[in-house]
Every structure is written in structure tokens, then in C-alpha cells.
Amino acid sequence: MSATPRVTVWNEYRHEKRNPRVQAIYPEGMHTVIASALQGAGFPVRTATLDEPEHGLSGEVLADTDVLIWWGHLAHGEVADEVVERVYRRVLDGMGLVALHSAHFSKIFKRLMGTGCDLKWREGDDHERLWVVAPGHPIAEGLGETIELAGEEMYGEFFDVPPPETLVFLSWFSGGEVFRSGCCYTRGSGKVFYFRPGHETYPTYHHPDIQRVITNAVRWAAPTLGAPRAFGNRPPLEPTRETA
Amino acid sequence: MSATPRVTVWNEYRHEKRNPRVQAIYPEGMHTVIASALQGAGFPVRTATLDEPEHGLSGEVLADTDVLIWWGHLAHGEVADEVVERVYRRVLDGMGLVALHSAHFSKIFKRLMGTGCDLKWREGDDHERLWVVAPGHPIAEGLGETIELAGEEMYGEFFDVPPPETLVFLSWFSGGEVFRSGCCYTRGSGKVFYFRPGHETYPTYHHPDIQRVITNAVRWAAPTLGAPRAFGNRPPLEPTRETA
Amino acid sequence: MSATPRVTVWNEYRHEKRNPRVQAIYPEGMHTVIASALQGAGFPVRTATLDEPEHGLSGEVLADTDVLIWWGHLAHGEVADEVVERVYRRVLDGMGLVALHSAHFSKIFKRLMGTGCDLKWREGDDHERLWVVAPGHPIAEGLGETIELAGEEMYGEFFDVPPPETLVFLSWFSGGEVFRSGCCYTRGSGKVFYFRPGHETYPTYHHPDIQRVITNAVRWAAPTLGAPRAFGNRPPLEPTRETA
Amino acid sequence: MSATPRVTVWNEYRHEKRNPRVQAIYPEGMHTVIASALQGAGFPVRTATLDEPEHGLSGEVLADTDVLIWWGHLAHGEVADEVVERVYRRVLDGMGLVALHSAHFSKIFKRLMGTGCDLKWREGDDHERLWVVAPGHPIAEGLGETIELAGEEMYGEFFDVPPPETLVFLSWFSGGEVFRSGCCYTRGSGKVFYFRPGHETYPTYHHPDIQRVITNAVRWAAPTLGAPRAFGNRPPLEPTRETA
């Protein structure tokens, strides 16, 4: 895609309003911090949240969205099936989706994966170290060998997703676990990237490397003006042979 | 899995009762022909069909099934969501699924893929030639370089599935199309194999090579008594260092 | 990579000098036609050929090359092992490689694949139809569902390469074969794309869709300024736990 | 492959003769311990070592070998290129290869990978925990969620191999690193499995889980009597259309 991708950052936006610890870190919501980082990278960005009408994801908004970022946790069940279906169809038609942290359990991510997407977890102030295992991948551009997060929630294997088509990051946790933390998938004409970090009680989305990964992921997941996906009953295409 | 896998062959079983042309080829249903081939290979086999209670797929039947074969076409919408959910959970827990031909549009296959699973098609007596592109794969065991089907329905790309983890067969059609005809996937602890041939108006499931592929696929898809998939909140595992 | 990738088009450049039929199609060599197309797309391009000193691929040239295009056929054996080694190391360090047609048997491609890279072939004026099977992939950008080549040499499966990490094109040939025609690989920090069409006796590289694929492939294969590949003996990284 | 696979365990067999610490753990060599475990699993097993004529890998031995296990470290450079070439051709023709630990740097593994195969390392008595990330894979059969090794040499990312076709194990190291520890590849008709553990100064190959993984890997890597890999010039296959 040659044009600059238009981004919508979707956030459940509940923790920030209820939990003073989260509010201190993200006074205007995680989506605002992520949106600022993406605007700083030159993308046109809007935000949308659960409690807006249609969760802020009307057909018009999605039609104007090239890449959708998704953060949800407490209220996956409150996301309307109709909106999930709308996002799902847009992804198959080419819109990129970047699913962050607890979005592993969102309806839209589970729908696209075809698996349960469960995992192990611990809120225990683990040190998380993300190792780059695809050093030439565009999502790793500009990073060092690792990203260091002094405190994070642990997510551990087995992560019940299909094997990623490309694995970009592996996490090491001080408490003894590993996790496939950066996973690329293709669904229809769309690209999906799951990125693990971002528990609400840590300042993870303020971290420059994390912002860089999300920025890179937007570029990677942006739609390609590619070959159409065309289906249905077709007559034979038998070509004329040049010689006979 | 060391024990012999127990197979259930599921068939919609409608075409065979309504269409004399199909009845002539499969007087007792496609499932009976497939089941006979698998019994001949030494597997304990049962069959199940749409019009049985619970479509023949009670919890007890599924608990006793290591690999489920699925053929459906006209009546995907009549398969109860509750049964689809039951099959889905069994696959994640390790049961193999072999989806045949028009099962590409079955609820269970679409659920496991996370995509629309659409394709191009033509009932035009194309010649289909399946080329083996994974010659060392267990599903290709005992085959020659190609499988030749003198007449078949055409299925053409784009086939809207996730990129297969392993691609075993590619089909060439005389009318000008190609198709990824043998596609392997992992979902949870389960294995899924999609195999294209088998339109109801052709004697495809009587073909020895096709029977061999299905037999091989049962062996490949049989559950492994493997590592448990365990999830949820966990304390740290920090090991004692042996030396310091 | 934000900067515009610098391309070197390497051509064996023997057929064009010896065979009048080839000369009529490519009077100044295939490399010149490919280079013009890439210059038209805005890339700085140089060319290099077998009979130049060091085959035109000195260390300085390679250091200034972000993506190398390779066409060879008659004289794979004349390419000096030292130059092959130099190209190989540059690919692992991030330089993209686009291997065209009979380059499947080049020393550098076989070295990077780790397999024999053999295939079936026929000079028989087959019609070749390339189907896009990864519609959202950047290498398919701007294409329709197929690329039609009225006459081409046939390449048929089994193509003895590792399974491609991403399969972008499948070819259908009128004589009855299929081929994995657009194959993406990662090697070290570098990306490798194999693209099948381009027999010297056909005007394939004048075809706008073929030029578009090569242009797209250059963008896809361009190096990412990514995480370093660092190796060797390392002290422990044990982090300070935030809490205890 | 229905018949029981015949295994050859190849060992450099130098450390065991020179280093008393290694000798105490493997008095008759690592190959003997591994061979005993495989014999116990019912496979016909022979051993071969570097200092035998042709390193014990004559054409006759290889012709009688279905799966070759490889351990080497100090003396990769002493393995004759002619023997490497012989093993390479047998792998493409279907023989399985299980490369253990420091065999990542063996000539045969590097030849088959097409990359440098370098990594980070530390002899520091790390605790290694291998997590199963492919719970349904035959190589994980019979294991729990993890394999615990109280002391091992550390191997850390970036591991410079092509992305594995299937990733079975991920290692966590107490010193802060992760590693893709169980990697499956296809080369020609052959299967290759790399398995990380097994530094010579630890009793790793006496560990029942490690023996089980190697046993499972032999079954997985055993040749399939599959479709031939046939190459070269071919006439058209155009089929007679059944109808017109």
C-alpha cells in the first residue's frame, strides 16, 4: 500500500476509569498513548472505545480504517457479535489487525484464529525480556536484540493459537516461562499481528521499543492493493496454445 | 498414538437418496464406501449421518473417535451449532479431522480455519491431476507422482483458507485452474487435513489412490498422547540453580 | 528500510550474444530490460554480468546493493565459488535476493536452499497461467487474479526446494503440470524470492505484470535495519526482579 | 514407513576419551547410551564414530540406515566432505536426520539449512526448561508440559537457521535466554530434526524424557515410502477430456 495507512486504536477503556493505579499510568486511557505514538510516526489515527455507540466501530469508521489496534480484557463479552462480524469481514477484505496483550481472548481474535487462545498467566511483577527471533522482519526494524520490561504480567505456554506463520518475538519471564510474543498470521487478504506486552498496571505502552513495534506492525499489516479474492461458478479458461 | 485409531465417517447422506446418478455410484452412501476402505486398512470404523439423532455425533461417539471424516454439501446449515461446538472442542483436545471436498464450507471447518473458506468451482467434467508436492509426507505414502481423476468438479484458487502449515497436493484442472488440494493444519492438540476430491456425481471415493490418501490421513491425524494443554493462573517456577 | 533500495541486476548474458532468437527479444540483454523497469519504478539500479571481472560483484558493489536480482542458466558452473560465498554472506547479513527462472540451479540459490533444487521442464510453448494464492502479500500488489503468459518453458513439480515460508504464485501449464512459482524464504537477516517465469526465448521480462512482480519483490526483499545477529559466548543476563 | 526404522547413531567420540569429567558420565561414549535407549524402544541400531574408516558411514551403512543421529563438536572440520555429500544425498532421498546439540555447527546440518547456524552460548550451569509448544506433535508424545534439566550449557537466540517448519520445543534458561530447541525441517524426501540439549559434561542423554524425545524423533523422521522425486525433460501430459 503506497498511501499512509489510517489507524483506529480500539480500547475497552474500563480499567483506566476504575483502577487508580491504572489511571495514574494512563490518565486518558491506553488508546490515547498508543494513538499519540502512531500520530508521531505520521499516521492519521482515530480512537474508538467500548462504551461508544457501536463501540465506535461503525461501518463508516471501519471502511476508513486500514489497520485496527485492539486492546480488551474485562469486557470481551460485551462486544456485540454484529460488530465482531463487521470487523471480521473487513480483516478478510484486507484491513490489518494488531491484537495487544489480553486481546488474545477477544471475540475477534478467537474468531480469526479458530482456536481457544488460552494461556498461562501470573500477575507477579516478572521481568519480561523479548528476544527478536526474526531479525530481518519489518516488525523488528530499529530494535536491538531484546526489549526489556522490568515488570509485566506473565503469559506462558502453551498458547493455544495456530502455529504462527512468522514468529517475531519470544518472551523470557523471570519466573520460569516462555511465550511466543509476536505472532504473524494471514486471514483472507488481511494480516493479523498478536503482540503480548501491555498489562494495564504497567507503563508498557509508554516504552519507546513497544511503541516502535506497534508502529512497525501498522506498516506491516497495512492492506496491499492486491489481487481480488473472487469466488463462485466459473467457465473454463482454456487458453489457445501458441503452437500445436 | 500407538493404538489403532478409531474412525467415525460422517456423511450428510442426502444426495445419495435424491439423485439417481449419485445413487448409482454410491447406493449405500459415500460414507459406506469410505468406511469399507478404512476397515480394509484395519481401523475400527463407525459411520454417522445428518439425519440421525444428534447427527450421530453424541458426546459418547466423539469420545470414542480418534479421527472424524466429514463430507457435507447441501445441508451445512442443518448441522446443529451444539454439535459443531462439540466436534470443535474434541479437535482442540486432539481428535483428528479429515474434511473432504465440499466440507470446505461446513460449519466445523470454517470454525477451525477462521476464514470464509470460499473458492471457485465448475461442474464441467474437468480432468483433475493431483501432484504430490511433499513427497516425504506420510499422507503421500505409497502414491506415485500424481493421482489422475478423469472427471471431477473443478475447485479453483483463491481458496480462502489460512496458508496451510504443510501443502501435500496441488491440483491441475484441464479447464485452466489450480488448487491447493491437500492442506494440513494444527488446531490445539488436534490435526486437520483438508482433501479436495470427491464430488458426489463421480466415483472418486472408489479410486484406490483416493482411498489410500484418506487412509494415510487417518494415520497422520490420529491423536498423539502428548503434552497436556494446561492454562490459567500459575505461581513462578523458578528453579534452584545447581551451582552458583 | 526507509531509504530507497539500491538494486543490482545480475545476468549471465550469454544466450543473448549467441542465439539470434534471444537477441531479437533482448538485444542488450535481459538485465537491461529488467534494470529499465526497476529504474522506472524509482530504484537506483546497476547491472553486472558473468564475464566482467569478479562477475561484476566485487565486495564494493555488494556493499552498495540492497537487493540482488539473479538470472543464470548455461554457465552456473563458471561462477566463482569465492563470489558465491561473498553473495551468500551478504544475504545472511540482510541483502535481498530475487532468483529468476533458471537461477533455481545457480550455486547461490542451491547454497541458500540446502536442497538439490531440481524440477521437470519442457521447451514446448506451453501456456502458463500464474494464480495469486496470497492476495494480500506485497509481492502481489496491483495484480489481477492471474498473470497470463501465452508461451513459456514449462517447469513442473516436484520442485526440490524446502517448503516456501510463503507461497505467492502457483503456475498452471497447458501441458498438464503445476509449479510453485513464487516462493519466499528467510535466510539470516536476508529475504529470498524465487520467481519462475523468464525463459530466454520468450519476451517474458517485457510483460508489465512480470515487471511489476519483480518491482514488488525488490520492495519486499529490501533489508530491514533490524535487530543485530549477535553470536558467541555470553554472561548471564539475569535481571533484577522488581519485587521480591 | 511400516517397517521398523533402522537407526545409526553417529558420534564424534573425542570428548569421552579425553575429558575425565565426560568419561565419568559416558564411559563408552554418548552414542552407546543413545543407542541403548533406542534399542530398548525396539529399533535395530548401529553406531559409527569419527575415527572409524569413512567415519563409519560407508555407502552400505547409509543404504541400511533409515534415521541417522548426529553428535559432533570439536572436530566438525575433520569430517570428510565426501562423507558429508553422501549423507546429504541420502537425506534428500528420504533418510531422516536427528542433529543433537553442538551438531548445529556440523557440516551436514549447515549444508541442509543453507545458513550459518550460529548462536549464543555459555557453559554456566544454567537450569534449562524445555516447554512443549506443539502438544499434538508426535515428537512430544508421552511428555509432560516441560522437560527439566538441572544443569546444561546455555544456547541462546538468535539461532541462525531458517524458520522451522514446525517448532516443538522452546527452552528457557535461568540466565535470561530463550532458544528454539526442537525444530523440524523437510529437505527433499527427508526429514530433519534439530534437538538442542546434550552438552557432554552433563548426563543429559541419560534423562528419560530426552531419550523419549530422541525415540519419538526417530519415528517421526523415518522415511515414507512416498511419491518419487523425478526430474528432467518431460512431454506434455494433456489428458483426454471425458466430455466435450
Image (spheres, coloured by chain):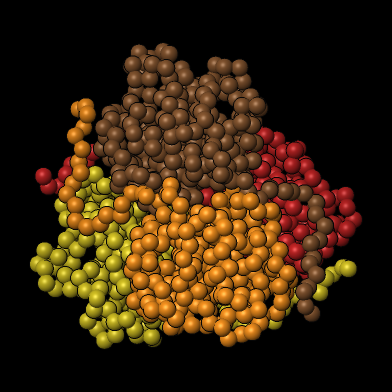
Chain colours: A red, B brown, C yellow, D orange
Q: Percent position (x, y) of residue C6?
A: 40, 75
**Left or right placement of residue B151 versus residue D131 in this view:** left
Number of callouts in the render?
0
Q: Quadrant of residue B154?
A: top left
Image quadrant in which you'd find residue C73: bottom left
Work out whether residue B204 or residue B119 is closer to the camera in this orientation and state it.
B204
Residue D27 sits above or below residue A200 on the image: below
Q: Residue at x 22, y 29 (%)?
A: D242
On the image, the x and y values in percent for residue D234 come to 19, 52
Measuring from the top left, give residue A86's x and y in whole percent: 61, 38
Question: Who's the residue at 34% across and 76% down the image?
Answer: D82
Q: Quadrant of the C terminus of chain D?
A: top left
Relative horizontal placement of residue B239, taking residue B154 as reference (left or right): right
Residue B165 visible here: yes
Q: Is residue D12 above or below residue A82?
A: below
Q: Going by the image, does C20 lie left or right of A220? A: left
Residue D162 locus on image (x, y percent): 49, 66
Q: Quadrant of residue C82?
A: bottom left
Tell me what residue is drawn at x 64 percent, y 67 percent. D206
**Most foreground residue, C31 or B42:** B42
Q: Nearer the viewer, residue C37 or C202?
A: C202
| Vertical position of residue A68 compared to residue D63: above or below | above
Instruction: Please tell me which residue is depicted at 69% across the width and 44% down the height of the picture.
Output: A106
Residue C109 visible in this rendered orientation of the protein: no
